[in-house]
Structure formats: structure tokens, C-alpha cells
Amino acid sequence: MTIDISPQIEARLKAKAFTEGVSVGEYVERLVFEEDTRRIRLTEFTRAMDGRLRSLNGGESVDGEEVMARLIGELDEHEGGPSAR
């Protein structure tokens, strides 16, 4: 398959792929996979937030610091951050 892109974008893709030690095709596949993963995570996050907002609107009380700590912990787990170790 051939994809027409500007010479500037082609050069950037080649440089980034080289830096990562992969082919341009592998690099583009990784970008697509990562974008799909971000979209899925955003959808899950949005659903979770909608559920939490419904609970709050229903009168449930929560500790804001506890909720934020849990959300940050979940993000760290997905990102491989400090909480995931």
C-alpha cells in the first residue's frame, strides 16, 4: 500500500522510527494502536465519570481526595507509572 504524505511528515516518521529502532511501518502501526488504546481508555473514563455523577446526583456523598487518589492510581496503572510498580 502506498500512502501519500508530505516530505516533512515522511522525514519526521523516519526519524522517529529510527529513534525507536523500528521500521516506519512498525512505528505507524504502533501509533495507530496507541491512538485506539487512548480512545478506549477515554470512553471507559467518560463512562465511569458519568456513573459517578449519576451517583452524586442521586445523593451519594464521596470524599473528593479519595476519588482523585483512586483516579490517579488508575491512570498510573495504565501508564506504567509509580503506582503500577
Image (cartoon, grey):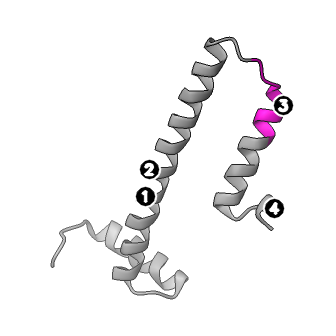
Q: First in sequence: mark 2 or mark 3?
A: 2
Between 79 and 31, the one nearer to me in the picture = 79
Q: Quadrant of the N terminus?
A: bottom left
Q: CA distance from mark 4 to mark 3?
A: 18 Å
**In x, y percent, where is residue 43?**
46, 42
**Cβ atoms under marks 2 and 1 closer than 8 Å:** yes
In the picture of the structure, the residue carrying the numbered disc 3 is 65
Q: Which mark, residue 22?
A: none
In the picture shown, does residue 30 fall above or below 24? Answer: above
Q: Amino acid at mark 1?
A: Glu
At 78% from the left edge and 23% from the top edge, which residue is drawn? 62
**Cβ atoms under marks 4 and 2 closer than 8 Å:** no
In the picture of the structure, the residue carrying the numbered disc 2 is 39
Residue 6 horizontal side relative to residue 30, left or right: left
In the picture of the structure, the residue carrying the numbered disc 1 is 35
The residues colored magenta run 61-69
